Image (cartoon, helix red, strand yellow):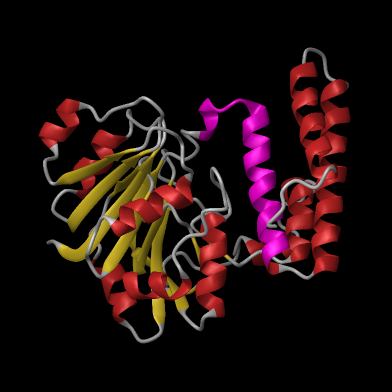
Amino acid sequence: MTHPVAAVIVAYRSRPHLPSCLAALDGKVEQAVVVENTPGELPDPELQDRFPWVAWINNDSNRGFAAAANQGISATSAPNILLLNPDCELHSGLAELVAECDAAGVAGAGGLLEGSDGSAQVGFFARSLPTPTTLIFEVLGVNRAWRRNPVNRRYRLLGMRLDVACDVQQPAGALLLLRRDALAAVGGLDERFHPAWFEDVDLCKRLRDAGFRLRYNPAAVARHAGGHAVATLPLQARLLAWYGGLLRYAEKHFSGGWFRCVRCAVLVGLVSRTLYFLARARRAQAARAYWNSARLVRSGFPSLS
């Protein structure tokens, strides 16, 4: 059953995933647009023939997820927007998410994401918004070494019931239905988050600050491969994107003192990882990538000015 939904799919080196993503979406949305962010990669004519209901936007450079998503949103007219990663295969309908967004005060709703083995991607598909302590624990590796520490349990909602619909602060942007009017009220995605990471966290934060609620509903399910585009990037580019997005979020939403604490923790974490990789045989290239990132952070990267 088709619902008043426009799907927006931002693609970057995603061609192997698009056929199954679009096939699973067929008949479930009014509109769909794929925004191709891979420089020099034109749409596959076979895909265009197979999915004539999909519109394609071709960018000649990687404009970043936020800018490309805004492009796709502007190219559609349905009252609800489904942000869907190209490596997501929707295994359900969208009726429950649409119903969630029809409730008073609700700006958006996400569903249950499963990995390639069918297990729930707990800690990813729904989270709390990060606090300064959360990000400090992240960049120092505390949450990785001690996964069930109280800070990480609250952040990744490790104790949540997966079978119960509920309010959440941060449903994942990989499968997120949003009301168009709520997006317009906060100005869409912030394109200064480039090329990716933390733009969806920032959006959820701004929606909640504007008085909207966000929901999780397990009736909407998608198989999510995860990380397909990231794996194609050099380590240096991945580090700059992730740490850059994290610092931009911290600078934007935390006080000056807390931002400086997060930035200091980032620097300590990067230097520690540099030393770790230097101590391991044949890992000099990784050490160099972390050290270069630390130098950029020390020089003030990134800045919102």
| Magenta region, main secondary structure | helix
Quadrant location of the C terminus in the rendered image: bottom right
Q: Is residue 245 magenta?
A: yes
In percent of width and height, residue 130 lies at 66, 64
In percent of width and height, residue 20 lies at 26, 37
* Front-lying residue, 51 or 227: 51
In percent of width and height, residue 253 lies at 68, 68
> Residue 140 vs residue 239: left or right?
right
Query: Is any atom of residue 101 visible in this view?
Result: yes
> Residue 229 vs residue 72: left or right?
right
The residue at the point 19 percent across, 41 percent down is 23
The residue at the point 32 percent across, 58 percent down is 73
> Residue 23 vs residue 256: left or right?
left
- In the displayed orientation, state which residue is furthest to the front: 305
The residue at the point 29 percent across, 36 percent down is 18
* 213 versus 39 height, above or below: below
> Residue 144 vs residue 262: left or right?
left
Query: Is any atom of residue 120 visible in this view?
Result: no
**Residue 261 sits in quarter:** bottom right
Q: How many marks?
A: 0
In percent of width and height, residue 102 lies at 29, 80
The residue at the point 27 percent across, 51 percent down is 91
* 127 versus 264 height, above or below: below
Tell me where the magenta segment starts and ends, as one range.
Answer: 230-252
Q: Is residue 19 magenta?
A: no
